[in-house]
Image (cartoon, rainbow, N blue to C red):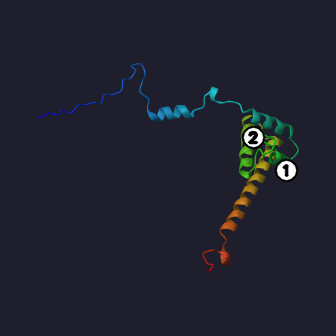
Amino acid sequence: MLKIEPKNTYSPPDRDAHTPVQSLESRMLAAQVPTPDSKRPDPAFEHLYQLLLAMEGQGEKAIHEFLRTLRGADGETAAYPTAQALMAITLQVLVRLKDEGLEKSPLYREVSGANGLAFAMDLFTKEFMRDVFQPMGDEAWEKSEW
């Protein structure tokens, strides 16, 4: 008769005596806090920012039109093809202007106005799509007869 003895094969991993145990929360917080080395400059944004600084005084419609017609790196496709992309880049520019203490400048007001135009365009598009795909009233698909 064979006797089978349970064998405990688990052994805790060897830990380096010099490395303290860190909680998951502390490691996540450390990963989220930006370090000076983690802020890499974006050359495309820097170029756009300088172009917009030069456009100060031309008005929100001119800035909005400039951003709408701006081409991407390939020269063919739009750099900001949607209203949401326009809102994102204008918000990024507004944050940069505020960081540099230019929130009272005419450029800040103009970029803010361009952001408002992009927001209105996005809202119009969403409402139009809702009306097309979910008509209300007598045209509602729930009331239609087959």
Q: Is residue 5 above or below residue 112?
A: above
Q: Residue furthest bottom?
A: 145
The part of the image, by quadrant, that contains residue 58 is top right
Q: Tell me the kind of residue under disc 1.
A: Lys
Task: Tell me the number on the disc at residue 143.
Answer: none
The residue that mark 1 highlights is 61
Measured as percent of width and height from the top left, residue 89 is found at 73, 43
Relative side of 77 to 36, left or right: right
Of marks 2 and 1, which one's residue comes earlier in the chain? 1
Q: Is residue 43 above or below residue 86?
A: above
90 vs 48, nearest the viewer: 48
19 vs 97, nearest the viewer: 19
Q: Tell me the kind of residue under disc 2.
A: Val
Measured as percent of width and height from the top left, residue 23 is found at 43, 32
The residue that mark 2 highlights is 93
| Residue at the (71%, 31%) spot, across then down | 41
| Residue at the (66%, 73%) spot, across then down | 136
Q: Quadrant of the C terminus?
A: bottom right
Q: Residue furthest top?
A: 18
The part of the image, by quadrant, that contains residue 22 is top left
Q: Dot 2, how many residues are within 10 Å of its Cα: few (below 14), some (14-19), or many (20+)?
A: many
Measured as percent of width and height from the top left, residue 44 is found at 76, 35
Relative side of 3 to 85, left or right: left
